Amino acid sequence: MSVPTLSNKPENIDLLVLPPGEKKVSCEISEKGDCNIFTIKLEDHTIGNLIKQALCQDPKVTFAAYRQPHPLQNTIEITIKPKGYAGVNLLSDNVNSLLSDVSQLRESFKKKVQRYKDKSVYYADE
C-alpha cells in the first residue's frame, strides 16, 4: 500500500536552501506608511513567535505581529509599528538580544548537564 503524497508539497531542498540571488530578509512599508513589513524566508512559527514576543516587550514598538502567509511556504511576515524609530534597527536589536539570550541559555544548559554528569559519575563509583 503506497502512501499518497501531496502534489503541491514543495521539495525538501526548497525548505532548507535559499536560491542563488535571493535575500533572506526583505522590508517594505505598509500601504498606510506607518508599519514596516519584514519578509523572512526559510523560517516558520518558531522564530516568528520569538521575534514578535521580543518586539511586543520593546517600549519603542507600538504594535508587532507575525504571520505565515501559506502553510506550504517556509516564509513569515513580521509587521512592526515603531514609535518614531527605524523598524530595521528595532528588528536588528531585538534579534541580537534574542541571540544573546539563546547563547546564555545554551551555556547554562551545558553547565547543568556537566554538573549532572559529574554527580552521576561520582555516585556510580561508590
Image: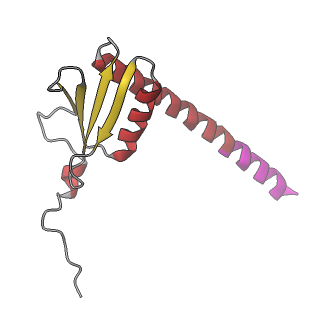
**Is residue 104 toward the left or the right of residue 27 in the image?**
right
As drawn, 97 above or below 6: above
Seen at 24% across and 30% down, the residue is: 38
Instruction: Return the residue found at the far bottom.
Output: 1
Q: Nearer the viewer, residue 77 or 111?
A: 77
Seen at 23% across and 29% down, the residue is: 37
Q: Residue 9: x, y in percent? A: 17, 62
As drawn, 119 above or below 9: above
Q: Which residues fall within the magenta stretch?
A: 113-126
Q: Which of the 4 image quarters holds residue 35?
A: top left
Q: Nearer the viewer, residue 12 or 9?
A: 9
Instruction: Return the residue found at the far front.
Output: 32
Q: Main secondary structure of the magenta part?
A: helix
**Is residue 61 toward the left or the right of residue 6 in the image?**
right
Q: Magenta stretch containing residue 105, yes or no?
A: no
Q: Residue 109: x, y in percent? A: 61, 41
Instruction: Return the residue found at the far right.
Output: 126
Q: Nearer the viewer, residue 97 or 107?
A: 97
Q: Which of the 4 image quarters holds residue 126?
A: bottom right
**Is residue 84 toward the left or the right of residue 17 in the image?**
right
Q: Residue 58: x, y in percent? A: 45, 22
Figure quadrant of the N terminus: bottom left
Q: Which of the 4 image quarters holds residue 96?
A: top left
